[in-house]
Image (cartoon, helix red, strand yellow):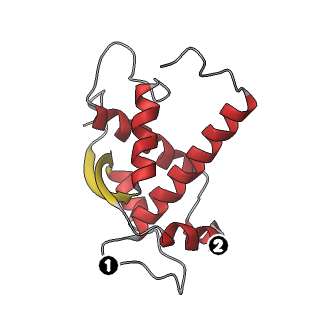
Amino acid sequence: MDLFSKVPLVEIPVMITPEEKAWLEMMLRKGKIAVPPGGSLPEGSVISIFMRTMLWNSEELRQNLDIVPKEALDALLAKKELLEIRIQISADQKAWLDNIRVPDKTPLSPNDSAVSLFVRVLLENAMEQQKALEQADPWADDDEE
């Protein structure tokens, strides 16, 4: 169940790059992915909450892998070193993700999946947005670390 014991959660494995994992951990350390008020949670739970939010937004926008340019997919697929993380998502999100399909002629490595590729697309977009925010405000992190 989620924090409020209202939404049943399922745990799924996803494959992400070491850079994406390092970025998630850095965002946690800096407090940019915040723990909900009134408590502390294990790192994996906070990452799961962040991923559920990104997936919910993608579902609302009806995003899928078909809208990702082939060049961007090829760049993601060229990264062969992948790490497995486990995230908890809602049963509804799992059902939605089960319908994600890789575009035709997009080869996946044996340990990869359409769901993992979609999660990597979302993480890459989030990383690019964060980088753009930091470039827009170069002093934003002066007081950290």
Q: Residue at x 25, y 50 (%)?
A: 11
Q: Is residue 52 in sight in this rendering?
A: no
Left/right of residue 4 with respect to residue 53 in the rendered view: left
Marker count (numbered): 2
Query: Dividing the image into 4 quarters, which one contains the N terminus?
Result: top left
Relative to 46, say whether 90 is above or below: below
Amino acid tagged 2: Glu
Q: Residue furthest right?
A: 136
Residue under numbered circle 2: 71
What whole-number distance in Å separates the C-alpha atoms at marks 1 and 2? Answer: 21 Å
Question: CB of mark 1 within 8 Å of CB of mark 2?
Answer: no
Left/right of residue 47 with respect to residue 55 in the rendered view: left
Relative to 110, say whether 25 is above or below: above
- Coordinates of residue 2 in the picture (x, y in percent): 29, 34
Left/right of residue 68 with respect to residue 9 in the rendered view: right
Amino acid tagged 1: Pro
Frontmost residue, 55 versus 127: 127
Q: Residue at x 38, y 23 (%)?
A: 35
- Coordinates of residue 145 in the picture (x, y in percent): 47, 19
Residue under numbered circle 1: 110
At numbered mark 1, what does the secondary structure look like: helix, strand or loop? Answer: loop
Q: Which mark is residue 59?
A: none
Left/right of residue 19 with respect to residue 10 in the rendered view: right
Badge 2 local density, few (<14 within 10 Å), some, or many (20+)?
A: few
- Coordinates of residue 29 in the picture (x, y in percent): 41, 27
Frontmost residue, 118 versus 4: 118
Relative to 79, say whether 9 is above or below: above
Q: Residue at x 42, y 70 (%)?
A: 114
